[in-house]
Amino acid sequence: MRAPWHRSEGTPGEPSVPSAVARFAVAGIVAVAVVGVVAFLIMRSIGTSEATDNASEVTSLIGSGIVEPNLTQAVIDGDPAAVERFNRLIDDRVLNEQIVRVKLWDADGTIVYSDEPRLVGQSFELGEDERETLEHGTPDAEVSDLDEPENQFERDQGKLLESYSQVIGPDGEPLLFETYQQYSSVASGGRDLWLAFAPALIGALLVLELIQLPLASSLARRVRGAHRERVRLLERAVDASDQERRRIAGDLHDGTVQDLAGVALTLEGAARRVEDRDPESARSLRDGARHARESVRSLRSLLVEIYPPSLQREGLRAALEDVLAPLEARGIEADLDYDDSVELDVEEEALCLRVAQESARNALKHAEARRVSIRLAGDGDGAALSVTDDGRGFDADAGGEAGHIGTALLRDLASDAGAELELDSAPGRGTVVRLRLPRS
């Protein structure tokens, strides 16, 4: 018989520190990536917003610093010489690779000046934002809708950003000054802002991840230590239970069982001595002797359940036969199907015996079964024990009588051994208890 194994070192279900730290690291990298993407989107939005505000500010500065001081009534009236001088001013000091178009609107929505002469004199309806800027001087900017009629000559410029500011005309009336800027320059400004902060942000996230890895490793070691301590406590509890069962079995066998056997012999001898003189007393003494012998048999059956010596001396097959013996004594048909090629260690044999004992006890006391069978066979890479009865069964989903076989306790023991316990029952069709053991 092989030596018992201990689950304290490298047991199934024991937390692995490298695996736990690796999972934490992967989760941390995913979190860093998510935070990085969100931060990128937020900062890009902030950068774009800042670049848009800067474009509005540039338009406002151009309007107040260049357009307004040099705008004359002659330009507004369309005097060719005045318009030519103003065009040169706009070409030299305003238009560039970023600013591709300028327009000057009056309150009626008429374009009074533009570097595109075909727009001058045309009238279009001003939007709410444009009127807000015209009336209150609040700068504004938005992406150009190139499908609008007033933007027909800008459609070949790509995506543009319209910026508005208020200028005061020569007659003191407010005019709307508008520039069209390449949107790529705005996006570039947002990207530049993101790139300026990206190294610091990514570096901070990575440092945070690296700081957390030792903490994760320490926590995983503590969890593993707690798991090992739990397993050690369970092993000690099982060992203590086994020792206590042996002690109780020894006390019963050497004490109560022997005493009752002596009482039975004494009563039987007394019955023989008084049989001729007092037949009635002899019958009573023999009844007492019979009851004493029955009590001895019951106690010996209990001893087998408490501590089956056959498991230690003769192996699991003999112990399972002992489990079925009390059922046969009660007139219940019992059979054992045992595959001798199945190899189990001591702990697994003890678990199989415990499951068989609990299941057989339930079939005897609660299920009103007429037939009980135990089967042990190979199951893939492991082994499987099944205990089947044809009793009245119960609703396994609702709990029912599952408590009679200590289902919760058996499942805990199976789980601690890396095994799996299943219960299949329904009212009127009996019960099947299956224990699946992995390869040792």
Image (spheres, rainbow, N blue to C red):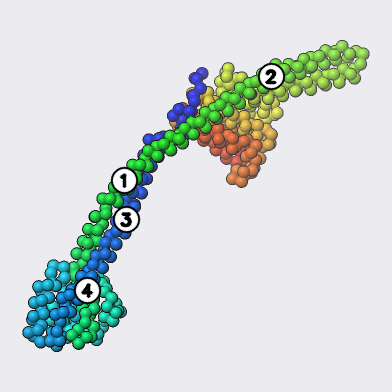
**How far is the residue under mark 3 from the one under mark 4?**
31 Å
Q: Secondary structure at mark 1?
A: helix
| Crowding at mark 2 (Cα within 10 Å: few <14, some 14-19, many 20+) | few
- Nearer the camera: disc 3 or disc 4: 4
Image: 207 above or below 345: below
Task: Kindly identify which numbered label has been placed on residue 277.
Answer: none
Who comes first in sequence, dot 1 or dot 3? 3
Q: Nearer the viewer, residue 85 or 129?
A: 85
The image shows residue 187 at horizontal and vertical percentages of 23, 63
How packed mark 1 is, by other alpha carbons closer than 10 Å (few <14, some 14-19, many 20 or more), is some
- Residue at the image point whose x is 24% and y is 71% from the top: 56
Element at label 4: helix
Could you tell me which secondary element the residue under label 2 belongs to? helix
Query: Relative to residue 109, is residue 381 drawn left or right?
Result: right
Relative height, residue 211 to residue 12 (above, below): below
Q: Which disc number belongs to residue 60?
A: 4
Task: State whether residue 217 is above or below residue 132.
Answer: above
Q: Is residue 113 left or right of residue 350?
A: left
What's the residue type where badge 1 is placed?
Leu
| Percent of width and height locating residue 43 | 29, 58
Q: Residue at x 24, y 58 (%)?
A: 193
Amino acid bearing label 2: Asp
Q: Dot 2 corresponds to which residue?
A: 251
Residue 131 visible? no
Q: Position of residue 6 (x, y in %)?
A: 49, 25
Residue on which disc 1 sits: 206
Q: Which residue is mark 3?
A: 39
Image quadrant assignment for residue 381: top left
Q: Amino acid at mark 4?
A: Ser
Q: Earlier in the sequence, mark 2 or mark 3?
A: 3
Foreground tag (2 vs 4): 4
User: What separation in Å lies between label 1 and label 3 (alpha carbons)?
Assistant: 14 Å
